[in-house]
Image (cartoon, rainbow, N blue to C red):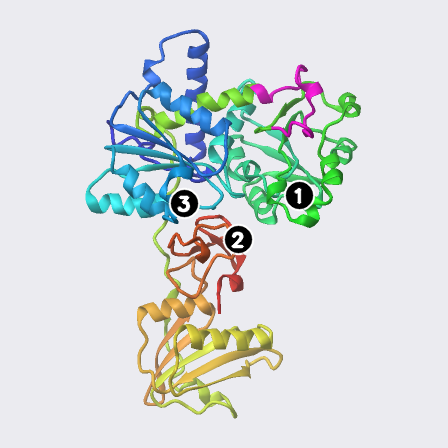
Amino acid sequence: MNTVNPLYGRSLAVAGDLSVDEQRYLYRKTRELKENWRKNRNLESFRIRDPELAVYLMFLENSTRTKESFRNAACFHDVKLNVFDASSSSFTKSESLVDTVKMLFGYSRRSIFIMRTKMEGVCRALDEQVGEYAERIGMEKPVFINGGDGRHEHPTQEYLDEFTFLEHRNWDDSHLHVALIGDLHHGRTVHSKTEGLKAFHSVKVDLIAPEEMALPESYKSRMQENGFEVVEWGSIDEYLDGPDVSDTWYFTRLQLERMGDEIRERETELRKAVTFRKSHLDRLPEGARFFHPLPRHREKPVIPSFLDSTPLNGWDEQSVNGYFTRIIELAMVAGKLGDDFNGSSPVPESKEASFVSEVPVTRKTHVEDRFKVGIKPVENGIVIDHIAKGQPLEEIWNRVEKIRRILNLNVRSSHGVFHTNNPAEFKGIISLPDKQEISPTELKKLAAVSPGCSLNIIAESSVIKKFRLDMPPKIYNFAEISCKNPECVTYPEAYQHVTNYFFRTGGETFTCRYCGKRHAYGDIWDI
């Protein structure tokens, strides 16, 4: 096995785990496989054929198409297939996912786990935790493939969707105009399109859903950040009255099981807004094709059955494509394919950029000399200055309290809120005469809880060192932070013992590494 292969051993937790070049490689190889299969040619060049490779189907949530297409794909490869039955496992005894996977992957020299869970971010967490364990005991790191996790993502469905769109467009990847219709709020297949649609050079997305089922703002923002043109419509009727109707329609079902009672009570009204009717037929552009990740609701489908035998039916071929794309996905991560890949892979995660910088001391006298009231000058100690500068008074006091609690500043001290040089602007100050030094860890924690502040070390009534603390690119390993998504694998009540990890995605917005939920900076803190 060529371990230099850039695709070998890669987990697929989200659609973006394959670069655009790697996705196009996947589609090219799938096209070759499908053409050879249809012409009854020899397919050995695609087969893994390794009895030491175990493929585990761990579907902790019901599935037909994803599970069966992966099962058949594994059978194609002639590997050791294991269909995991959660109902008869130790999950019923509250065993953690990590413990279960650690046990299973020890049974084979190499392992691929295909996961479907209600919990979000599971594959990323397992890739890290079990990967560390494998390295510790000298075994090959297992691969994890996300077959759908809650409302988060479904990358392998996204790959088969993009392959199908390309096939429909005769492999022209220059431009795609697609209408996404239905429950865009809860539909994980649509969420994966924020990255998957980048397989096309130019993308326009029409979002068609009532407000209650609209695409979450975070995913819409990510589409726009990726350069997609995005337009929103409240219903199919409203959309067909518009000036530019797509010829590629992608429907999703109403996921009533994930909706609240108030929304479910309006099911009829909401369903009507995203269900195609016969009266719409003559308003479609020439060559239009409909797609759907399936299954459809057998009684109330958004694509009614009268369309099944029409040229609009693209969903049946789309479903079959799941088999071919998943054969290639397994071949890629198992190292059977990829030696001839010559494009770019995802950029490795950068080392943490410095956000704590020492700055020259331009004023030797300690900072409190500027104030007439409130804080006694410090002869020796530390002064934290410019806390939440320019923020409302309530936020400044809140930030001062957070600093004291998170840094455990239960020492003799004083603090307050004062004017800056601008009489209309305020800032917080904490004076710590009993604290003579601060550790690098404390500096990072201070920067995380109060970016923009400065720290002055005072000796003999003069500032001898000064640090400026900027907004960090990552915040993690703090007991005082948490993802506020109750479906996230890091959520305390999930009891999976995954450490919270956030990375900054612009301004003061931080995204959970596991479930992808975006948080305002202040929302990640628990105190």
Name the N-terminal-most of marks 2 and 1.
1
Between the residue at mark 1 and the residue at mark 3, the CA separation in whole angstroms equals 33 Å
Residue of label 3: 92
Residue 422 is marked as none
In front of the other: label 2 or label 3?
Answer: 3
Q: Is residue 524 magenta?
A: no
Between the residue at mark 2 and the residue at mark 1, the CA separation in whole angstroms equals 18 Å
Residue 213 is marked as 1
Amino acid identity at mark 3 = Thr
Between the residue at mark 2 and the residue at mark 3, the CA separation in whole angstroms equals 32 Å
Estimate how packed mark 1 is, as few (under 14), some (14 to 19) or many (20 or more) residues with alpha carbons within 10 Å: many
Residue of label 2: 518
Judging from the image, what secondary structure is the residue with disc 3 in? helix
Q: Could you say which is closer to the camera, residue 49 or residue 232?
A: 49
Q: Position of residue 132 (x, y in %)?
A: 28, 47
Name the N-terminal-most of marks 1 and 3.
3
Whether residue 434 appears in this view of the structure is: yes
Which segment is the magenta one? 296-316
Quarter of the image with the N terminus in it? top left
Amino acid identity at mark 1 = Met
Residue 321 placement, left or right of 359: right
